[in-house]
Amino acid sequence: MKLRIKGNSIRLRLNQNEIQEFQEKGMVKEVVKFGNSSESEMQYIIQKTDKSEVYATFDSNGMMIRVPYLIAEKWISTNQIGFENRMMINDKEDLFILVEKDFKCLQPREHEDESDMFPHPAEGTLKC
């Protein structure tokens, strides 16, 4: 699972195996290690929930994106590329959350294993 953070926006991209795991287990977790202790790890998790909207939480272990079951099941079982939500933080700020299926790049990239990514819809027509 890839994580991209820019300002008040979070984007997750899941490959085919991760989406299968999300479907079967209801969650996918990644850990980034910055050192040898558990205090120097950051987790990011996507998990199904019975709530009505996509939302994020953050604590000392990292962040969790929670996705309503109906949104998750539709995304998993169709050609839908992704889903998004703007989670209100206060009356002036929001957090933009985007979750997508991870597509192969149109041009091979060094050091990038794309064997489990989804075929790109524009494969053969465009270049990165």
Image (spheres, rainbow, N blue to C red):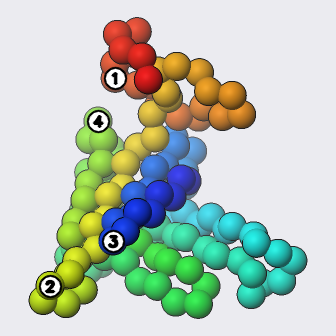
Which of marks 4 and 1 precedes in the sequence?
A: 4
CB contact under 8 Å: marks 1 and 2:
no
Vertical order, 27 against 75 (above or below): below
Residue under label 4, please give it: 79
Q: Residues within 10 Å of mark 1 (few under 14, many from 20)?
A: few
Q: Residues within 10 Å of mark 3 (few under 14, many from 20)?
A: few
Secondary structure found at label 2: loop
In percent of width and height, residue 66 lies at 37, 73
The amino acid type found where label 2 is placed reads Lys
Which residue in the rendered view is the most extreme toward the left? 91
- Disc 1 target residue: 121
Mark toward the viewer: 1 or 2: 2
Callout in the foreground (1, 4) = 1
Residue extending farthest front:
7
Q: Dot 2 corresponds to which residue?
A: 92
Mark with earlier residue (4, 3): 3
Image marks 3 and 2: residues in contact by CB distance under 8 Å? no
Marks 1 and 3: which is nearer the front?
3
Residue at 24% over, 86% down:
89
Task: Give the residue at x 50% y 29%.
Answer: 104
